[in-house]
């Protein structure tokens, strides 16, 4: 797994980040979603490195083996703003003053926040299987509530962690055949860890509180993503069912936008790595000029 990549750890202001890096050239930061770790990129990252990119794949704060933010009443430590700051600090420590970022699922929210809060550093943004949190909540209706009921269950104190930890394998599913043996083993180790499960759920609690407020403040101030943005979504997931024209949801937040569907289920990095790597390479190629 991750042939030619180095597994490492680095201390940022709020704690330690576990990450892998490999390749050379313009830097690309890949951010995973829930409940995965950085190893979800094991089929995509080497393809990007082979195309001439320096690829960094971290466990997000609260996830995997990275630090777990301190609990506070406002969930600010688990906010996407705090996680974006940690990711920007990591990239600076690795010598990348400018970089592209691509995030999937919950990682797309941190990627979005990176582009909003660090416009001088982020050169290109890719968001996968997600729309801004405030857009999802404001468009919430019966269909959303039925499909994404877990957003609201996860906001309840303590009970989500107890439900998940009663049988993590049944709750999250996944197989070694579909995910790859080493990726599956890493995933299994963290979903059975109570501290990590709590950290992952806190990410959702922050989403319904402080993250929504941060999005609202940006919209009220007229802030937009300054760099080119690519939005990708899985054809066999529910983003089109929920929003129809997904790009129209992103348009008010961007200055230059493109994208479309990927023929895949939700975990596109594992299910359609070649196509995803091709689309990412095509979008990121101008950084090599």
Image: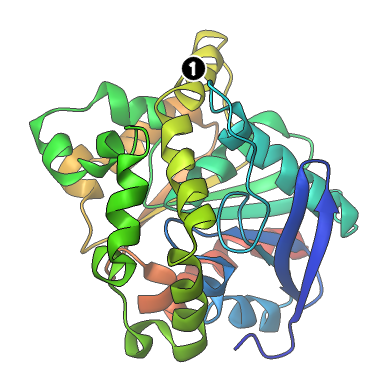
* Crowding near the residue tagged with mark 1, few <14, some 14–19, many ≥20 C-alpha atoms within 10 Å: some
Q: How many marks?
A: 1
- Residue 226's place in the image compared with 186, above or below, is above
The residue labelled by disc 1 is 213
Q: Nearer the viewer, residue 258 or 277?
A: 277
Protein image colouring: rainbow
Say which quadrant the C terminus sits in.
bottom right
> Which residue is drawn at the image coordinates 44% and 67% (left, top)?
192
**Residue 241 spot, x, y in % from top left:** 15, 46
Work out whether 39 lies above or below 50. above
145 or 198, which lies in front?
198
With 75 as the anchor, is 118 left or right in this view? right
- Spot occupied by residue 66 in the image (x, y as percentages of width and height): 66, 58
Residue 226 visible somewhere in the drawing: no
Q: Residue at x 68, y 84 (%)?
A: 50
Position of 3 with respect to 145 (left or right) is right
Quadrant for residue 70, please give it: top right
Provide residue 85's location: percent of width, then percent of height.
73, 38
Q: Quadrant of the N terminus?
A: bottom right
Residue 221 placed where, x, y %? 57, 9
Q: Is residue 197 above or below residue 138?
A: below
Q: Quadrant of residue 247?
A: top left
The residue shown at (24%, 40%) is 245
Q: Residue furthest top?
A: 220
Q: Is residue 228 left or right of residue 67?
A: left
Q: Residue at x 63, y 61 (%)?
A: 284
On the question of residue 212 being in view, the answer is yes
Q: Disc 1 on helix, strand or loop?
A: helix
Q: Nearer the viewer, residue 28 or 9?
A: 9
């Amino acid at each position: 797994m991750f042939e030619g990549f180095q597994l490492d750890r680095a201390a940022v202001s709020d704690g330690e980040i576990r990450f892998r890096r490999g390749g050379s050239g313009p830097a690309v930061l890949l951010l995973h979603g829930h409940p995965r770790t950085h190893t979800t990129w094991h089929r995509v990252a080497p393809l990007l490195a082979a195309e001439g990119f320096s690829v960094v794949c971290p466990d997000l704060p609260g996830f995997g083996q990275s630090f777990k933010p301190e609990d506070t009443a406002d969930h600010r430590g688990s906010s996407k703003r705090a996680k974006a700051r940690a990711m920007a600090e990591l990239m600076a420590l690795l010598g990348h003053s400018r970089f592209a970022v691509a995030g999937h699922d919950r990682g797309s929210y941190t990627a979005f926040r990176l582009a909003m809060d660090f416009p001088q550093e982020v050169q290109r943004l890719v968001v996968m299987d997600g729309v801004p949190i405030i857009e999802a909540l404001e468009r919430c209706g019966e269909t959303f509530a039925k499909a994404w009921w877990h957003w609201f269950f996860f906001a309840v104190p303590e009970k989500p962690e107890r439900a998940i930890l009663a049988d993590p394998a049944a709750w999250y599913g996944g197989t070694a055949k579909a995910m790859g043996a080493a990726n599956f083993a890493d995933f299994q180790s963290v979903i059975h860890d109570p501290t990590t499960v709590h950290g992952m759920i806190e990410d959702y609690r922050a989403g319904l509180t402080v993250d929504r407020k941060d999005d609202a403040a940006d919209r009220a101030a007229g802030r937009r993503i300054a760099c080119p943005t690519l939005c990708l979504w899985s054809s066999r997931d529910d983003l089109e069912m929920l929003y129809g024209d997904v790009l129209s949801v992103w348009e008010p937040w961007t200055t230059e936008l493109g994208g479309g569907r990927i023929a895949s289920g939700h975990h596109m990095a594992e299910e359609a790595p070649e196509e995803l790597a091709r689309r990412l390479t095509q979008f990121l190629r101008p950084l090599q000029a």
